[in-house]
Image: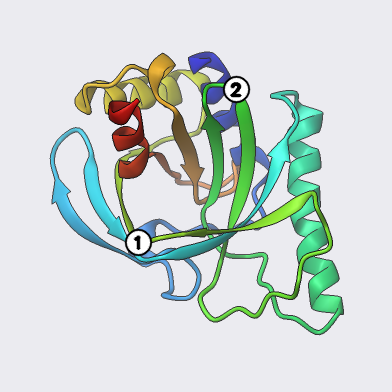
Amino acid sequence: MEKLVVLLVSLFLMFFKGQNGMAPDSCPSQQCPQYKLINKNQDFEERLYDATKWITTKIESSAYADLMAAHSRLKDYCERQNNAGYTIADDTWPVVITVTEGHDLSMSWFVAPGTAIPENTDHSVTLQSKPATTVYVRPFTGTPGIQPAQENANALLEALDKNCANLPTYSGVGYESYYAVTHHNEVWIYDYDINYKKAK
């Protein structure tokens, strides 16, 4: 499963929504999830994120065509809602690919605060609301690829004393096009997922 996540992290960076992504410390307040840095060490950051909303769609498999299809569903959803008179930005960051229970895959785009979203009739796209929560984050730079993503995912899990194969949910996060000059990539693990695992 580790290889699948690493592959997803490297692939999804290749078809981000826009050409100019932004690292968290330079994101406008409405374009990225806001957080307070609680702790930082050489291995990871502990961030307290505000409550957030996301539009999310399932990824059928790790095949490139399925990743592209998920991206297109989110893009089309935003366009349809904008044509209907709602303003749902499709240039927010980051793009998140999440692996749940080791096999369910999804792609999510951040919804800017204050965005009015109509009742959803598209069952392939869901609106997710996440409460304010602690997220453990390992940022890393460099061109996205299998080896650096794998190294950083494993390093975060080891720093948290967790094993990737046993972790219920974890995410690969990115802020730039694959073709950007510089890259800010991250691996996220939510505190409630760690607590969920401990409670099982």
Most extreme residue toward the bottom is: 85
Residue 57 % position (x, y): 70, 46
Q: What element does badge 2 sit on?
A: loop
Answer few, some or many: residues within 10 Å of disc 1's Cα (few below 14, many 20 plus, some between 14 and 19).
few
Q: Nearer the viewer, residue 194 or 93?
A: 194
Residue 78 to residue 185: above or below: below
Q: Position of residue 68 (x, y in %)?
A: 77, 39
Q: Which residue is mark 2?
A: 103
Q: Amino acid at mark 2?
A: His
The residue sitting at the front extreme is 200
Q: Which mark is residue 132?
A: 1
Distance Cα–Cα, label 1 vs label 2: 26 Å
Q: Residues within 10 Å of mark 2 (few under 14, many from 20)?
A: some
> Would residue 125 be found to the left or right of residue 101 on screen?
right
Say which element carries label 1.
loop
Asked whether, in this view, residue 118 is left or right of residue 35, the answer is right
Q: Is residue 108 above or below residue 29?
A: above
Give the percent coordinates (x, y) of residue 53.
53, 63
Residue displayed at 36% across by 20% down: 151
Asked if marks 1 and 2 touch (Cβ < 8 Å), the reply is no
Q: Is 155 located above or below residue 70 in the figure?
A: above
Marks 1 and 2, the one that precedes in the sequence: 2
Q: Indicate the position of residue 197 as horizontal and vertical percent values.
A: 34, 28
Which label number is shown at residue 65?
none
Q: Residue at x 86, y 80 (%)?
A: 84
Residue in the picture at 63% in, 43% down = 107
From the viewer's perspective, is 129 left or right of 18? left
- Chosen colour scheme: rainbow
Residue type beneath disc 1: Ala
